[in-house]
Structures are given as structure tokens and as C-alpha cells.
């Protein structure tokens, strides 16, 4: 996993291109929708798990404003380096990057004095080795009525005529993104936080899962 994301972190343009392909050209729409589901307000604090090169940051920054705080967490130093370049180019002063395994997150390790308003992860939880612990830590850090949103991918449904592409898709994304579509992400979220709202896009290959901590 480390070598895979080191490769992408050193090649942010190629990584951005791969996201365009993954989202079938609807990346902006889907990232915006995921951030909208967080229902953030100006001044809020939000964590971006497996933030990569910071492709979610523009949407998150627009949501929380200059008075809010964005914390990008990623295991890859190379990804964070590219994210740091994006932050400098935009002149954002309220975005903090943390080099960390998502399964080891806590308010203390992120130097936070209070629980956060929202947490987002895009194409990250399905690649994190200890996804259950990462999700548990995320829910733990959310405030009461805070929102956790997962934007991720899965193979074409068995009812789709495009399902014949699944073997190729699974192979490519396992090798080049450490993607594991078999992870029980939704079931884990339900056990940790309750009812999960799921909306599917792109013929069922992309989903946005939203849960509100109660």
C-alpha cells in the first residue's frame, strides 16, 4: 500500500486523471454532493480521512470558510507533499496535514480540543488495511449529531450488462489502489453509529454513505 500511494503522490496529475476515470467524468459533482451531505457550516471543523493530494479541499474549504478548520490525514508522505503544494497554491491557512494511519487517529493525536463537526473519506476506507478501527476512531471523534460521509466505489451490479468488466476492474484497482471492494464498510458503520443512508451513482459503481452520530 505504501509504495502504491507513494507512486501516486509523486504524480499528482496522473492521480487526478485516475480519479476522473474512476468517477466516469462526474468527479466534481460527486465530491460536491459528498461534502453537501456533511451539512457543514462556516467555522466548522472537518477531517478528511485518506485525503490524498487534497482533491476534496476546495469543496471543504468552501463549506467551512476561512474561519473553519480542515484536517487532512493520510498514510503517504508523498500524497501529503502534493496536498501541501495545493494548499500553498491556494493560500489556505486553515488546512492542517497529518501523516498518520487512520486507525490511530484520536482527538489527542490530531491535537484537537473538541469533537469535530464532520468527517469525510473519498476512495479511502476501501483501501485502508484496518478499516473497522479507522471507522471506529472516526465515529469516536464526531460530536453528537456530527456527520460521517463515505464516498467510495464498488463493482458493477450483477444485474448490469457491464458486469463483465468487473474482473478487469477488480484486478486493476487492487494493484494500483489497494482497493478491496469486499470490505464490510456499511455494516461496520451501522454497528458503530446506526442507520446509514446510501445513494448510488454511475450505474451502481459509486456510492455515498452518510451517517449521523446519535
Image (cartoon, rainbow, N blue to C red):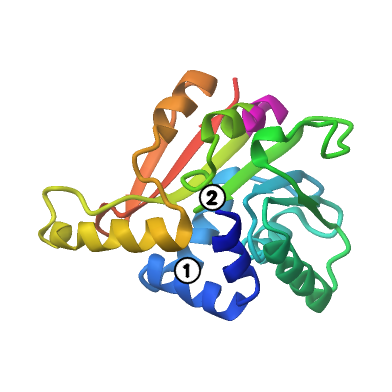
Q: Position of residue 86 (x, y in %)?
A: 74, 73
Secondary structure category for the residue under label 2 = loop
Instruction: State the residue lying farthest toward the front.
Output: 3
Q: Report which quarter residue 160 is drawn in.
A: bottom left
Let me know if residue 59 is in the magenta part.
no
Tell me the tag on residue 143. none
- Region rendered in magenta: 137-146
Looking at the image, residue 157 sits to the left or right of residue 73; the answer is: left
Tell me the tag on residue 19. 1
**Residue at 70% over, 45% down:** 47
In this orientation, which residue lies closer to the viewer: 95 or 11?
11
Secondary structure category for the residue under label 1 = helix
**Residue at 54% over, 22% down:** 193
Tell me the tag on residue 124. 2
Looking at the image, residue 78 sits to the left or right of residue 93; the answer is: left
Q: Position of residue 32 (x, y in %)?
A: 54, 60
Amino acid at each position: 500500500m505504501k509504495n502504491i500511494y507513494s507512486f501516486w503522490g509523486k504524480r499528482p496529475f496522473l492521480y487526478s486523471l485516475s480519479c476522473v476515470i474512476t468517477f466516469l467524468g462526474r468527479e466534481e459533482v460527486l465530491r460536491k454532493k459528498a461534502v453537501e451531505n456533511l451539512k457543514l457550516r462556516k467555522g466548522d471543523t472537518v477531517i478528511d480521512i485518506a485525503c490524498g493530494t487534497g482533491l476534496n479541499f476546495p469543496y471543504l474549504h468552501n463549506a467551512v470558510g476561512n474561519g473553519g478548520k480542515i484536517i487532512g490525514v493520510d498514510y503517504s508522505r508523498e500524497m501529503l507533499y502534493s496536498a501541501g503544494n495545493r494548499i500553498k497554491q491556494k493560500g489556505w491557512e486553515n488546512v492542517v496535514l497529518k501523516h498518520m494511519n487512520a486507525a490511530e487517529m484520536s482527538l489527542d493525536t490530531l491535537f484537537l480540543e473538541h469533537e469535530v463537526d464532520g468527517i469525510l473519506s473519498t476512495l479511502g476506507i476501501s483501501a485502508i488495511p484496518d478499516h473497522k478501527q479507522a471507522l471506529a476512531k472516526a465515529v469516536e471523534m464526531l460530536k453528537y449529531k456530527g456527520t460521517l460521509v463515505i464516498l467510495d466505489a464498488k463493482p458493477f451490479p450483477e444485474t448490469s450488462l457491464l458486469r463483465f468488466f468487473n474482473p478487469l476492474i477488480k484486478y486493476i484497482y487492487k494493484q494500483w489502489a489497494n482497493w478491496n471492494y469486499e470490505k464490510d464498510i456499511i455494516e461496520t458503520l451501522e454497528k458503530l453509529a446506526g442507520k446509514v443512508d446510501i445513494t448510488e451513482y454511475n450505474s451502481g459503481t459509486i456510492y455515498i454513505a452518510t451517517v449521523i452520530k446519535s
